[in-house]
Image (cartoon, grey):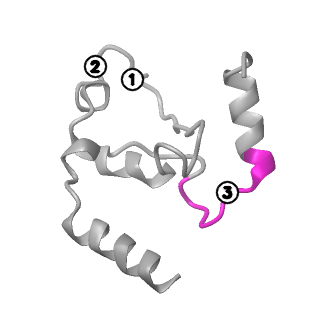
Amino acid sequence: MTSFKISHLLQTLEGNQAQLTSIPNLVNRDSWEPKKMYRAVTTLPYVHFHPNFLWSYGIDTLDGYTNLVLKIFVDFWHYGLHKNN
């Protein structure tokens, strides 16, 4: 358990954040971003994309305010948007 924590800490400190801040569709949002106020929702929180990552682009999130995302919330968005799984 301790080695996992140390490994995760090293990845956090040494990790490259360029992948987070250089997603083309999020950098250039003119083609899809609504003009009215909106909030984004992550469909697979903590699996591929943490809900708070959108804040680095200035996008407000519906699910980024919680520390723990309930499984029922994840399932709702996952099966509602990814019906083939």
Residue at (51, 46) in percent of width and height: 61
The amino acid on which the numbered mark 2 sits, given as a three-letter code, is Asp
- For disc 3, the marked residue is 69
Instruction: Estimate the x, y position of residue 8 in percent, counting from the top left.
Output: 38, 71
Dot 2 surroundings within 10 Å: few (below 14), some, or many (20 or more)? few
Residue 62 vs residue 71: left or right? left
The overriding secondary structure of the stretch rendered in magenta is loop
**The stretch drawn in magenta includes residue 7:** no
Residue at (28, 19) in percent of width and height: 30
Instruction: Estimate the x, y position of residue 71 in percent, counting from the top left.
Output: 76, 51
Q: Is residue 79 placed above or below 66 in the rendered structure? A: above
Q: How many marks?
A: 3
The Cα–Cα distance between marks 3 and 2, rounded to whole angstroms, is 30 Å
Which-is-in-front pick, marks 1 and 3?
3
Residue at (30, 24) in percent of width and height: 25
- Asked if the residues shown at circle 2 and circle 1 are in contact, with their CB atoms under 8 angstroms apart, the answer is yes
Dot 3 surroundings within 10 Å: few (below 14), some, or many (20 or more)? some
Which disc is residue 30 wearing?
A: 2
The amino acid on which the numbered mark 1 sits, given as a three-letter code, is Glu
Residue at (53, 81) in percent of width and height: 1
Which disc is residue 33 wearing?
A: 1
Q: Nearer the viewer, residue 37 or 45?
A: 45
Which disc is residue 66 wearing?
A: none
Dot 1 surroundings within 10 Å: few (below 14), some, or many (20 or more)? few
Q: Report helix, strand or loop for mark 1.
A: loop
Instruction: Estimate the x, y position of residue 13 in percent, counting from the top left.
Output: 23, 71
The Cα–Cα distance between marks 2 and 1, rounded to whole angstroms, is 6 Å
The C terminus sits in image quarter: top right
